[in-house]
Every structure is written in C-alpha cells, then in structure tokens.
Image (cartoon, rainbow, N blue to C red):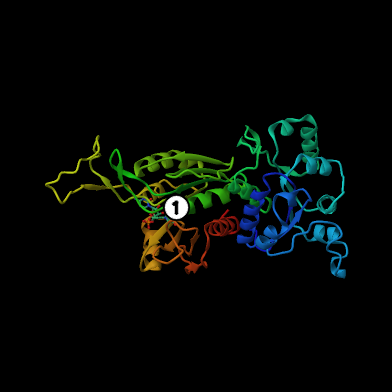
Amino acid sequence: MLKDKHVTLYVSGGIAVYKALGVVRELVKAKAQVQVVMTEAAQRFVTPLTFATLSQRPVLTDNFSAQSSSDDFIPHIKLARWTDLAIILPATANIIGKIANGIADDLATTTLLATAAPKIVFPAMNTTMWENPAVQKNLRTLDLMDMTVIEPASGFLAEGEIGKGRLPELTNIMVEIYKTFTKPVLAGTNVVVTAGGTKEAIDPVRFIGNKSSGKMGIALANVAADMGAHVTLISTVHDPISSPNIEEVHVSTAIEMQKKLEEVFPINDVLVMAAAVSDFRPVHQADQKIKKNNDQDIYTINLQKNPDILKEISKKKTNQFIVGFAAETENLIPYAQKKLKEKNVDMILANDVSKTGSGFNVDTNEITVIQPEKDPVTWPLMSKSDVAAKFWEYYQNNVK
Ligand code: PMT
C-alpha cells in the first residue's frame, strides 16, 4: 500500500525524535519514498545525517539550503506538491501552535502551510503541556482543518513521570499511516478470521501445538478492518496492533475455536480460516503435571481426531464466502484442490510451507489461489500484509 508513495516526515524537537527513526525504517521497508524535514530543535536531539542514512535522501532543514540547483529554487512548494502524505512526528506543542495559527517561520511550517496532502499529527510532550488549554485549543483547530491528530499514549515519560504524552508504539503508528491510503470499501461487511495454532493440552503445562505465529490471520484481520469491515478475530495469539473494528476472541483448543466460530458464523459475510488447527487432541488431559518415571523410556499419548472445523462449518453455509488455507509440503496444487472439494469452500489459499519465507512463523508468504472451475494463480512471495491486501482487493472486486 505504501509502495512508491511520497511521504514527508516532519520531525520537530522533543525527546521522542529518536522514535521517528523507526518510522522512517518501516516506511522505507514498505518501499515508500521518504523525505525528512527537521526543525532546528529536532536537530539537537538527532543529527540529520542519521535520518538521511535511513531515508536514503538528504534531509531538508531550512528554507535556503536547498537553493543551489534551479530545480530546487522553491523547495517548500516543490515538496508540498510532491507529498502524498505529511506526517508530523513527534509534534511538539510549539509546532502544533504554529500550524494551528498559520505561522510559517521555517521550512517545516512553511511547507506544511503549502501542502494540500492529508496530514497526520502525532503529538508527544509532557502531560501538563498536553493538558494545557492552549494546546488543546490548537489541537481542536487542527481537527477542524481536517488533520488527523493521534492521541498520545500513556506511560513512563522522559521526565521520569507517568502520564499521557508518549508517542504510540511503532506498530500503532504504522497502522495509522496505512489507514490514510485505505478506503473503507468493506464498510458494512462482517468478516470472521481465525488465526494461530491451536493448543491441545496434555497436562496443565504441556500441549500439542504447531509453529503458527498467527501473523497471516492477524494481517488478514487488520487489513479487512482498515478497509472498514467489522472483524471477529478468533485467535490463539493476541493481536498487538488491533484496530477498533476488530473484536478479538481468544481461544486455545480446536473445540473452543469451533464453538466460537459456530456462534458468529451466521452473522458474517466472509470466513477466512487461516488458523492451523490440530487434527488430533489427547484423549485424556492429566489434571496434574505428568511425572517422569525413571524405569520408563517410552510414553504413549492416545490421540483422538479433532473436528474438521472448516468442513463442518461449510455445511451451515448460507451466503457466506468461505476461504480456507492449505499448508502443504509437497504436491501443493493437487492437495489444495482436494481440500477445496472435500471441505466445500469457495477458495483455498495454498502455501508451500517447506519453501523458505513461506508459511509458518515468517513475515512473508507465497500463495497459490485455488478456486472451483478456475486455473490456479500463484502470487509472488510478498509480506503477509500484502497477501492480505491482495486477497481483500480480490474479494472487493470479484465477490462482494
Ligand atoms: O500463523 P503464521 O505463522 O502466520 O502461518 C500461517 C499459516 C501457515 C498457519 C497459514 O498460512 C496456513 O496455511 N493456515 C492453515 C494451516 C492448516 O491447518 O492447513 P491444513 O492444510 O492442515 O488445513 C486446511 C484448512 O482446514 C485450513 O484452513 C485449516 O484452518 C482448516 N482445518 C484444518 C484442520 C481441522 N481440524 N480443522 C480445520 O478447520
């Protein structure tokens, strides 16, 4: 979503400047083109060279330094027109006051005044400053000017106090940035996504599990939520970047997952079953930790079959679009096609989990889309967020 987007990051002077470095790294990783503009105060905390190295571009610091080439004769206007998204992070009380009142006394504030692109403001300051009526009035003005102001988080502040004023966590910052480029095309759509590997208890401390990290399912849930869907995420792992559109339900076993899914399935339009469900569970779960017996080298655990959640829920289908995954280590397409038929689903997203960078517990995936009466289509290896974006884009254009 951020690929080739022109993002201008305005860094003003506060202790949180160092956190802007992480944002630049994430933006560059997402293939955005990033131009950093630093106020004079910001340069006292971190040097422009650090930002230039990470963003792979010279940092702009004042109105006059970039005028050597005729191309850059009026850099503030040029930069303003180049920008698809302007981010002010960290935004001090000072820069907030200037923007709210149309003051343009350096490159950052001048360019912001000339920029028509969407603007996200991430204030970070001491709690008392944050609560000051003048700052709050200026923030309301930014709101009226259609800027997105992200409330600071609460926690330990640089001055040693605890209170509101910290920049949000990096993942939450990135979610807000991604949102700017996402239209709410899935508003009114109800989606249920399952994620993570089920854990089938052997005793109070041991379980049968698998390598699923939940990343694939969580990415599908987050992208759908960003696109405006209401999402029920039934997951064995917690989603650290959850959005207000996501209702997260924590489960552990296949039986718990099935029970919750059966409850919510009738009120949903789409089911994406990304969870790695254990096919078996121990027949008995010991009440106490099983003790090692020194005379015994071999232990046997009797297993019983778990329900095939996807196959069973498909029998209850009314209008839902049902999507399963297939995690294979060989014969990817024939095995996935068999699952499509046997589980009676509308689509299988097949991943060869033996390939490097694909499948369990990695940030990327290579998916082959299997549908009835259609040729399989393989998407190149990409981040799980991009897989999710591609899937929902397909759903929006071809199914909805
Ligand atoms: O969580 P990550 O670390 O990001 O990894 C992602 C993933 C590899 C887990 C994901 O991409 C994936 O492939 N999920 C499905 C894993 C799986 O269980 O595949 P399967 O081929 O065994 O099952 C086929 C389908 O039936 C799946 O949609 C599965 O959720 C479902 N199933 C399986 C067994 C069972 N008892 N009930 C089910 O509903």
Seen at 15% across and 44% down, the residue is 293
Q: Locate residue 206: give its quadrant.
A: top left
> Which corner quadrant of the figure contains ligand 1?
bottom left
Amino acid carrying label 1: it is Ala
Q: Position of residue 59 (x, y in %)?
A: 75, 60
- Viewer-nearest residue: 237 or 378: 237
Q: Locate residue 205: give its quadrant.
A: top left
Q: Position of residue 304 (x, y in %)?
A: 24, 47
- Please give left or right for residue 326 compared with residue 302 in the image: right
* Residue 67 visible: yes
- Please give left or right for residue 114 compared with residue 315 in the image: right
- Farthest-out residue, front: 44
Where does label 1 land, which residue? 274
- Viewer-nearest residue: 221 or 4: 4
Seen at 50% across and 49% down, the residue is 218
Q: Position of residue 49 (x, y in %)?
A: 70, 60
State whether residue 320 is above or below residue 82: above
Seen at 37% across and 50% down, the residue is 277
